[in-house]
């Protein structure tokens, strides 16, 4: 099985940067995903890492260290619309996703 | 991009009745779809993997006789909650793998089930 940990809540100011950490312990690893989920809605795909290193995608970047079982999602130039829950998910060899509990990010003016 | 739809978006039913939720891939074929359940302020929990033309694979602790899954075509999977109880009230979300090389899952908009 998978054990995935991420902080419960984070608060930041509009225009700032926030880093959401995710640690995992897995029985099989076939990629790490980050999703954004607004309340009452389905998750939307943000990023994917399968090799170590940083993947940059506009204001969002994601980093992976497989040896440390660690990833982070970096949100830059925060906007009010970025207030949401951010889910770290690990995929196993059967293409199943296991999700962390999610980190609720609140962006304040 | 790929679109996954769900119907209905919300449903209220009485305890003891059954409810069917549909999940459709609108512009791509999905040989595999996944069904998740999400309780308030909790993360998504995988219930089962739905494979076209074969029986679904259920996760540990999920009752296959209570949550009936049918994947009759490459674009449609259905989840039927039988003899629903108030504790089945939850947000049910389906997903399907994209055909990109990294195969992220596209999620449907979810179905809010309330059992009274």
Image: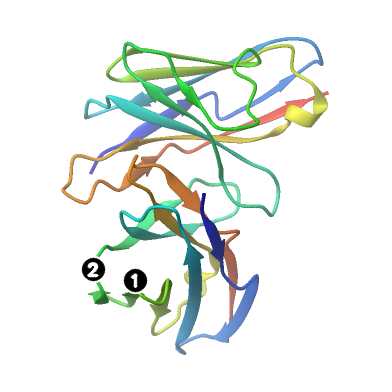
Residue closer to the observer: A4 or B104: A4
Residue A109 in view of the camera? no
Report x, y in % for residue B5.
Answer: 40, 30
Residue closer to the observer: A50 or B8: A50
Residue B105 in view of the camera? yes
Q: What residue is drawn where x is 68% and y is 11%?
A: B18
Report x, y in % for residue B104.
Answer: 30, 48
The extreme front residue here reads A27
Q: In the picture shown, does residue A22 fall above or below B8?
A: below
Q: What element carries label 2?
A: loop
Query: Could you say which disc has been placed on residue A51 in the image?
Result: 2
Read off the chain for label 2.
Answer: A
What is the CA distance from the residue labelled 1 to the residue labelled 2? 8 Å
Q: What residue is drawn where x is 42% and y is 71%?
A: A69
Colour scheme of the rendered structure? rainbow
Residue closer to the observer: A32 or B97: A32
The extreme left residue here reads B101
Is mark 1 in CB contact (under 8 Å) with mark 2?
yes
Q: Is mark 1 on a helix, strand or loop?
A: loop
Query: Could you say which disc has been placed on residue B37 in the image?
Result: none
Q: In the picture shown, does residue B24 fall above or below B65?
A: below
Residue bearing mark 1: A66
In the picture, measured across the screen, residue A90 lies left or right of residue B10, that is left
């Amino acid at each position: 099985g998978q054990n995935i940990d991420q902080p419960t809540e984070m608060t930041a100011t509009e225009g700032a940067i926030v880093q959401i950490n995710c640690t995992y312990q897995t029985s099989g690893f076939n990629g790490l995903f980050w999703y954004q989920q607004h309340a009452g809605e389905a998750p939307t795909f943000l990023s994917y890492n399968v090799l170590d290193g940083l993947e940059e995608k506009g204001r969002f970047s994601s980093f992976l260290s497989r040896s440390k079982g660690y990833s982070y999602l970096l949100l830059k130039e925060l906007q009010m619309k970025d207030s949401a829950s951010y889910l770290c998910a690990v995929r196993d060899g059967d293409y199943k996703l296991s999700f962390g509990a999610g980190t609720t990010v609140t962006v304040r003016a | 991009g790929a679109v996954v739809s769900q119907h209905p978006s919300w449903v209220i039913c009485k305890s003891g009745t059954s409810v069917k939720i549909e999940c459709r891939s609108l512009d791509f074929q999905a040989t595999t779809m996944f069904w998740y359940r999400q309780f308030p302020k909790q993360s998504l929990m995988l219930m089962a993997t739905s494979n076209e033309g074969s029986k679904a694979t259920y996760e540990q602790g999920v009752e296959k006789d209570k949550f009936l899954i049918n994947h009759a075509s490459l674009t449609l999977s259905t989840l039927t909650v039988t003899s629903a109880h108030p504790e089945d009230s939850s947000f049910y979300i389906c997903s399907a793998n994209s055909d990109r090389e990294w195969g992220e899952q596209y999620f449907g908009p979810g179905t809010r089930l309330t059992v009274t």
